[in-house]
Image (spheres, helix red, strand yellow):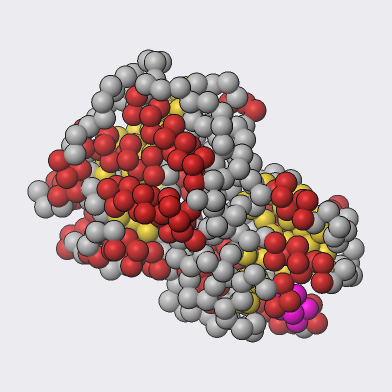
Amino acid sequence: MGDADGTGGGGRRRRLLLVSTNYAPEHTGIGPYATQVAEHWAALGHETHVLAGMPHYPSWSVDPAYRGAWRRTELRGGVTVHRRRHTVPPRQTAVRRALFEGSVLAHQLAAPPRMARPDAVVAQLPSLAGGVVAARLAARWRVPFVPVVQDLMGAAAAQSGIEGGDRAAAAASRVEAYVLRRAALVGVIHETFTARVTALGVAPGRIRVVPNWSHVAAPSRPREETRRRLGWAPADTVVLHSGNMGLKQGLEVLVGAARLDPALRVVLMGDGNQREALGRLAADVPNLEFLPPAADADFPEVLAAADVLAVTQRASVLDMSVPSKLTSYFAAGRPVVASVADGGGTAEEVRRSGAGVLVPPEDPAALLAAVRGLAADPGAADALGAAGPRHVAAHLSRAAGLARYDALLEEVLDGVRVGTARTGVTGGGEGGPGGAAPDGAAPGGAASDGAASGGAAPGGAAPGGAGTGGAASGGAGGGRAWRAGVEGAER
């Protein structure tokens, strides 16, 4: 989608619909990626629409500017955003998550966006409801459906520790299979997802790797200036975790590390449905502090001011997600300590970057030992930190990431033009959504504010070298467009 006139697709302007429950002004998690993709398409001249929920992540509380809103259509960054209200559960259980997904599904199917037939429908998963809505809308319009898997909800239900997750995992996997089998192509953000997606019934030749990218600027102010402002003394060893405080993060390991060493300063920055529980757990740990999410402009500076950036996951988390915070961590230029299961996508990304060390998950003593080792060897810590921005520049640039989305979409649309689109293009014959009411029509069901909800030994991680480039394409002409778009952007 990169022709001379800037519109791509052989010079033709497209009409595109992106379905993503998370969207700006959400500034962490999936929201920034969905926003940047949609605004990129709009900047290329495509008529771009987004079907989204009300902003609520990572606090799991509706943004004050949207409280009380039932439906809202707004123009943001050249993109028409259609929002639909849904439940926002402050605490995760399988039942509450099901209510969240059910309210998204009911309202978005009852009141899909008022727009002309698009050329393609793209969906950002993990929202199961959003995936179903996108698949059914694409089938109704008989246009290609392209989901991009950011998290696998079936695996998440089984691995994240959510109450009732074991019972929910099979149901979630069935819905994921329903959604993904109706896709023309399936994007995954990491190659470790491929086996799971294949097991759900998607042929390997229809899977493309579309990694996330670093969506924050490099830090620009002296670290010392930010540390003084935050009250961090020069002698403090500061370990910072930024982002969602959910079940799958297993942040108790950082509370444990802080309790083992009163001289260590542990900072949890962000929000999430486990924030209050962590506060209670750390009530007797004076060297652990909580910070609210940093403003976008200040975020890179706070990351760079820390001595160590921590990414943590429960031991059971293996192949369900790769934290989006890693791309920001790498850009900050500080060493990463990853308390995660070896063999999963997160461990692989840390190894690939050469920017951090791995420790066994849920082991406070191992995490503390790694932090102390870095504090005792500033040269090694700086070398690890310096590898992060190099990895971002080589493999995780925004231009390369957006080019992969363009190539994914163009591969599908090229197939439609030449009559070689796969059966998933029309949704496998699935019927369209019922009651396609325009904006402002009454929904089919009420949505009330209710409730739902996320080793290797220490040592230097060897750089992976290969980076996170796109997987080989299964289509002929489409594959050439894929490779040309990605390689051009990475150059």
The kind of secondary structure the magenta stretch mainly shows is: helix
**Is residue 28 something that shows in the picture?**
yes
Q: Is residue 295 left or right of residue 417?
A: right
Q: Percent x, y for residue 431?
A: 19, 34
Query: In the rendered structure, does residue 436 fall within the stretch colored magenta?
Result: no
Q: Give the range drawn in magenta.
A: 367-373
Q: Is residue 362 left or right of residue 111?
A: right
Q: In this view, does 254 lie to the left or right of 162?
A: right
Q: Considering depth in this image, is 217 or 155 the residue closer to the camera?
A: 155
Tell me which residue sits at (45%, 56%) in the image: 166
Query: In the rendered structure, does residue 371 fall within the stretch colored magenta?
Result: yes
Q: In which quarter of the image is the C terminus?
A: bottom left
Tell me which residue sits at (62%, 32%) in the image: 63
Q: Considering depth in this image, is 275 or 480 the residue closer to the camera?
A: 275
Q: Considering depth in this image, is 393 or 193 the residue closer to the camera?
A: 193
Quadrant hosting residue 443: top left
Toward the top, the furthest residue is: 441
Up the image or down, 156 lies above or below 98; here it is: below
Quadrant hosting residue 308: bottom right
Up the image or down, 123 lies above or below 397; here it is: above
Q: Percent x, y for residue 304?
A: 72, 62
Q: Is residue 236 left or right of residue 346?
A: right
Tell me which residue sits at (33%, 36%) in the image: 133
Q: How many marks?
A: 0
Up the image or down, 133 lies above or below 249; here it is: above
Q: Percent x, y for residue 477?
A: 18, 60
**Is residue 331 something that shows in the picture?**
no
Q: Percent x, y for residue 245?
A: 65, 52
Toward the left, the furthest residue is: 419
